[in-house]
Image (spheres, rainbow, N blue to C red):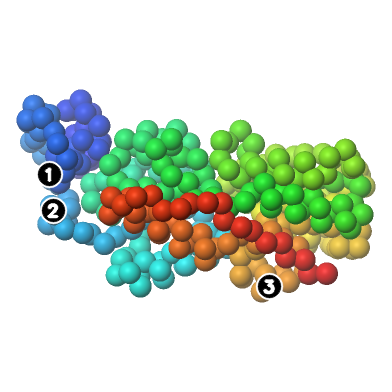
Amino acid sequence: MVSKLSDVAELAGVSVTTVSRVINSYGSLSQKTIDKVHAAMRELHYQPNAMARSLQGKSSQFIVLIFPDIQNPFFTSLANEIEQILFDKGYKSIIATSANNVEKEKQYLEMLAANQVEGIITSSHNLDIDAYSNTYLPIVSYDRFISDTVPIVREDNYRGGQLIGEYLLKNGAKNILMLSGDSSSQSPTTKRYEGFTAALGDKVSLSIQEFNSNSWPTTSEIDVIVNDVIQQNIDGIYAYNDIMAIQLQNALRKAGKRIPEDIRIVGYDGSPIVQLLHPDLPTVVQPIRQAAQRLIDVLFAEINNQDPVVNDVLPITFYNPK
């Protein structure tokens, strides 16, 4: 079996990052550490990546994008914007999808360290991955807490939640259902739910159901929600993203409910393709172009050892089809 970077690290008793530094002659390392890594490489017959060795002292001009799932139209749009801006700067993009698989993401990070990419832009949902804290690569995150050492580009999630609450109240919703992602996360997106509940106050009856936002709801899960909505006379729904909102629109209409006359459903993301195909969906529109540019600005400040760029909260808008 072909040995991996992690096998060398384990045998040498060092981190994957340290092995990568030895291979690429990067950073200050003791001769004892270098010798241990070389001895482990010899014992395992490990062959360092040829491309990485050829890039010593040079820029690879590769930036890696790690997103949960590019089937989600929002991440597709964000990746497209980032790729175009990077291309204009003379850089190339590698796109990796992490979903909810921590082991898969760890393997990606090992591979990236070994191949000496310039930096990483991530919106991973996976927390507590030591490799993020230990890697020497410049990293920036979008709207997700990854590590205390990784800067976050974030939007005004609290205001996004407020706008949804204000919209439902203005349109007379009294019995509201909030479909949220995993609330145990430390990520900035939890602010959406705080803003939403603050806007509603005690003016309405609010019920909450929590879902794994890393995966698509199944037909049976949608059927359960539809039954609950009908039985509980729900007249307003905040879905955690546009895809969930569209699935509910379709299912409730099939069940004989008028949308939006009987039930107001609001999504979150506002990607261009969703707005084009579903112009009747009220949603919070995330600043995709601004986010892509900010992510690149923050990342390149790290790459070039420059002062951090101004990284204030990005504004959101609310799309109301009326």
User: Residue 289's x, y, as percent?
Assistant: 52, 66
- Residue at 46 percent across and 53 percent down: it is 310
Answer above or below: position of 279 versus 264: below
Name the amino acid, label 3: Leu
Name the amino acid, label 1: Ser
- Residue at 26 percent across and 62 percent down: it is 61
Q: Give the residue pinned by disc 1.
A: 25
> Residue 134 lies in what quarter of the image?
top left
Answer above or below: position of 181 versus 299: above
Name the amino acid, label 2: Gln
* Marks 2 and 1 close (CB-CB < 8 Å): yes
Is the residue marked by circle 3 packed among few (<14), some (14-19), or many (20+) residues within 10 Å? few
Q: Earlier in the sequence, mark 3 or mark 2?
A: 2
Q: Secondary structure at mark 2?
A: loop
Q: Name the disc covering residue 218, or none.
A: none
> Residue 195 lies in what quarter of the image?
top right
Q: Is residue 115 left or right of residue 189?
A: left
How far is mark 1 from mark 3, CA to CA? Answer: 51 Å
Q: Name the disc covering residue 277, or none.
A: 3
Q: Give the residue pinned by disc 2.
A: 56
User: Residue 69's x, y, as percent?
Assistant: 51, 54
Which of 91 and 40 lies nearest the eye of the viewer? Answer: 91
